[in-house]
Amino acid sequence: MVERTRFLLDEAQIPRAWYNIAADLPVEQAPPLHPGTHQPLGPADLAPLFPMALILQEVSTEREIEIPEPVRALYAQFRPSPLVRALRLEKALDTPAHIYYKYEGTSPAGSHKPNTAIPQAFYNKEEGIKRIATETGAGQWGSALAYAGAMFGIEVKVYMVRASYDQKPYRRLLMETYGASVVASPSMETEAGRAILAEHPDSPGSLGMAISEAVEDTVKREDTHYALGSVLNHVMLHQTIIGEESIIQMEMAGEEPDVIIACAGGGSNFAGLAFPWLGRTFRGGRKYQVIAVEPEAAPSLSRGRYAYDYGDTAKMAPMVKMYTLGHDFVPEPIHAGGLRYHGMSPQVSLLKHHGFIEARSLHQRPCFEAGIQFARTEGIVPAPESTHAIKAAIDIALEAKASGEKKVILFNLSGHGFFDLTSYQRFLAGKLEDYEYPAEEVKHALESVEV
């Protein structure tokens, strides 16, 4: 008999509510601060950027927040996503560990990002907004918001980090196919972009810079709101549909994870998988080993400072308490562009600071090696970001092999790498390089961070 490897739910089992970890956090989260006054933000301060529904979700402490039916209807295009046991990978590793992955690459954009892009577009449409400005690193978030904008008839402007704009032209083309307008950031279209280019004409860009441009674009137009694909509480909230589904699917598999893993740049796919499981722990359930995996080139959780910092380079976005490498820090142009951010979600940072989760940082070459092994065993070419989670899962599976201990590992395969094949081309040609943690650059960037 062939052992079952795929655990699928039907459309009726799409969760009807997102899980809000704020209801169960055992420690209080520090409030966001106004970038100008450094005083706690109120709803009126955020109104120029976000629809009121999202502002209320940002500060909500309700455990469950209902998913609107128009959002669930669009989710049904690609949700529930499959949970898969990686039997072929287990065999290749000769490990007693059981490895499961939640595959988010089945969405129209090829990643987990539509889980929040769809509700963000919906709530903006409900408020009468006709245009949304945003940033994107690797292009997954920009692709997702471009798709959601097309579904709700909203114009989308995307500031794409220059390094990824050059590395991933097909991501840009996908956004444009959905109808979005895309420019490389830093650009000449904003004051923030022009100032950066005047000082650094060859800047590879960063998410902090692109956020500055998108926020500036937003505040200068009355018909425009801003949308963020990670970091903020409401984004973490929307992504929890991943973990909620995985709890049901692991029960179908007859197992419970010992270790939960996801890559982390701003925190969205990590929170999406891990928060519902952590919520069970906080309500008196079993504890899990929960690991956020980040790039060695931008290891905010592993090497950053836990402090209030700006979310963007130009200091226009709210200040939040998070693990940060400094808002002036520009990570090297690694191919996991979605992980090139100087900070981390305040909620993820809070959990790390109090020891509820752990963090690991990895170089990109061993991550691509893991991605190749995964492709050649499980048949899916993973996004460069996702290879970080795969590498960590393989490491733990090999530790289980050495100790003879059976462990159940669950990780989030946050997207496919079909638009990242130039990265794989460089790896296969032996041209992909690792970047050391830039301690001196981070030290300099942190000088302007307020504790």
Image (cartoon, rainbow, N blue to C red):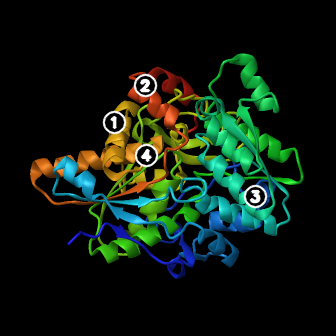
In the rendered image, the quadrant that contains the C terminus is top right
Residue 227: x and y in percent read 71, 53
Q: Quadrant of residue 198?
A: top right
Pointer 1 or 3: first along the chain: 3
Few, some or many residues within 10 Å of mark 1 (<14, 14–19, 20+): some
The image's mark for residue 150 is 3
Q: Which residue corresponds to mark 2?
A: 432
Gap between marks 4 and 1 measured at Cα: 12 Å
Few, some or many residues within 10 Å of mark 3 (<14, 14–19, 20+): some
Pointer 3 or 2: first along the chain: 3
Gap between marks 2 and 1 measured at Cα: 11 Å
Q: Contact (CB < 8 A) between labels 3 and 2?
A: no
Label 4 secondary element = loop
352 or 251: which is nearer to us? 251
In the rendered image, the quadrant that contains the N terminus is bottom left
The image's mark for residue 369 is 1
Residue 420: x and y in percent read 52, 38
Q: Which residue corresponds to mark 4?
A: 381
Q: Amino acid at mark 1?
A: Glu
Residue drawn where x is 23% and y is 69% of the image: 2
Pointer 2 or 4: first along the chain: 4
